[in-house]
Amino acid sequence: MVMSVLEEMRIRSLGVIDDAVVELSPGFTAVTGETGAGKTMVVTSLGLLLGGRADPALVRIGAKNAVVEGRISVPDGASAVVRAEEAGAELDDGVLLISRTVSAEGRSRAHLGGRSVPVGLLAELADDLVAVHGQTDQQGLLKLSRQRQALDRYAGDAVAVPLAKYAGAYRRLRAISNELDEITTRARERAQEADMLRFGLDEIAAVEPRAGEDVELAAEAERLGHAEALASAATAAHGALAGNPEDPEGIDATTLVAGAHRALEAVRSHDAALGALAGRIGEIGILLGDVAGELAGYADDLDADPLRLAAVEERRAALTALTRKYGEDVGAVLTWAEQGVARILELDGDDDRLGELTAERDALRAELGGLAQALTDARTEAAERFAAAVTAELASLAMPHARVSFEIRQTEDPEGVEVGGRPVSYGPAGVDEVELLLAPHPGAPPRPIAKGASGGELSRVMLAVEVVFAGTDPVPTYLFDEVDAGVGGKAAVEIGRRLAKLARSAQVVVVTHLPQVAAFADRQLLVEKTNDGSVTRSGVKVLEGEERVRELSRMLAGQEDSETARAHAEELLATARADR
């Protein structure tokens, strides 16, 4: 089966590394070197390539930025290829190029197949490409939530399917419960809101405003307030146009226009142009007559009625009282009233809604209890298989008498959901508290690994868990950062042997300080500093033959030329070769 392989990483200006290339290969690669030489920068670099957090403190002092570039060969049709191509990335002859740049100011950029991409996309690809494990992961395994997640991951669809159904019902229940809480806790506020709306609607109903009424009344008030001046102006204008009966000798516009019309009429037959002008003057005379008549009618109809003016101003005051509270004009007041009626209907319907929501909540709680029970059953069945598989792996890691088991328990809670005839607390992942227990030797009671496992035992438990995962939910590449911490002697040999076995079906990269582990590697890389304290291109090299024996001797005894250490190193290599 063709699988993805991390072929190479180039690291520049990261920590103690100035510029180095880490060449990897399929199988088991061990990365060794003196303490502080920069071995963990390999893990850090891979973490950056896989979307890890960018820490500007990682940038080498004096450099503007740190750059990590990686080459991963990916088979056609792999999900990582599909996702990368969707993002516009291009593969170089089946190789996916990834780069990550971190500036000293903290900015971070990611590129995938020559295309700039969000860092989050690299994290998505990481789930399908590489599993990274370090000492922080060992500590993470101590958390109950991580132990439950590990069990769920092992169980696969047996847990994933009921968990998805449970999670959907849980989200609906939370939404309904929140709405119920809002209705009940805000009942007083909502009652006050309804009372205020009713008061406003009563005020508006008492006035009975009409749309546009405020505009009409404003115009009428303006006219009535100036009736005397308007009448005087209309009378004067009428006199100017049609004459004043009290001044028969006065000259008015109508008389003058009529005289002009008569003068032209007498001679219009002699000239067409003059005849046209006579016609236009005749039209002016008619228009003057119409305007004069309307002015006379306006003056007669205008009534300076102080009672009507008072009534208009009173009505306007009533409308102004409404617009001051409910809208900028009468139209806005009427709109507020419409919305107020709708809101009152909504508020008055809370009692009915409360009953509906309560019934739906109770039904969902019952459904959630059933789904939680199914989830617990699935986890219980998977836990037995998972514990047996991890126990078998521990036997291969120099813990032949250790036993691993899971405790799946629930916490009673009067406000919880009913499972197995009793109310228990619940959350988004079900009602189960899952805890991994370890009995390191016969007669020892099973205890939580947080309390009953030493550092070395915890390292082996984590490795055993990952090996079990490799058989059920494999990833192409595993990278372990000192997974052998706290381990030595025979246990270290067994860890090396087990990592070599894992490497038969996956690429395994291990940062280690134990020669017993490094001896089992198909390839050993040495990371070493130059005299100025940096790691350069020549500082990461593949060890073969005599060089590898010297490095294993140094790891064994701190002395590269010790004959005893060299003999032990050669023996380790021979044992590993025979085992493979």
Image (tube, rainbow, N blue to C red):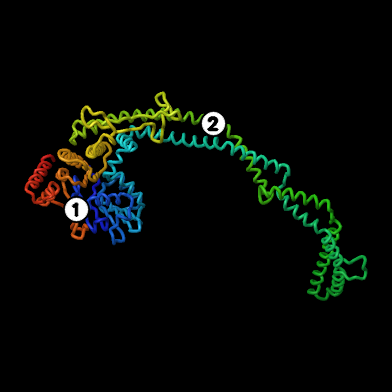
Left of 469 or right of it: where is 160? right
Crowd tier of the residue under label 2, counting other residues whose Cα lies within 10 Å: few below 14, some 14–19, many 20 or above: few
Whether residue 467 is visible:
no
Q: Amino acid at mark 2?
A: Glu
Q: Amino acid at mark 1?
A: Val
Crowd tier of the residue under label 1, counting other residues whose Cα lies within 10 Å: few below 14, some 14–19, many 20 or above: many
Whether residue 242 is visible:
yes
Residue shown at the point (80%, 49%) measured from the top left: 311
Q: Is residue 4 above or below residue 188?
A: below
Give the SS element for disc 1: strand
Task: Tell me the mark number nearer the camera, choosing from 2 and 1.
Answer: 1
Q: Horizontal and vertical percent for residue 568?
A: 9, 44
Q: Is residue 192 above or below residue 359?
A: below
Residue 527: which disc? 1
Give the SS element for disc 2: helix
In front: 343, or 567?
Answer: 567
In front: 235, or 224?
Answer: 224
Q: Horizontal and vertical percent for residue 242?
A: 87, 66
Which image quadrant: the N terminus? top left
Which mark is first along the chain, 1 or 2?
Answer: 2
Left of 378 or right of it: where is 277? right
Residue 356: which disc? 2
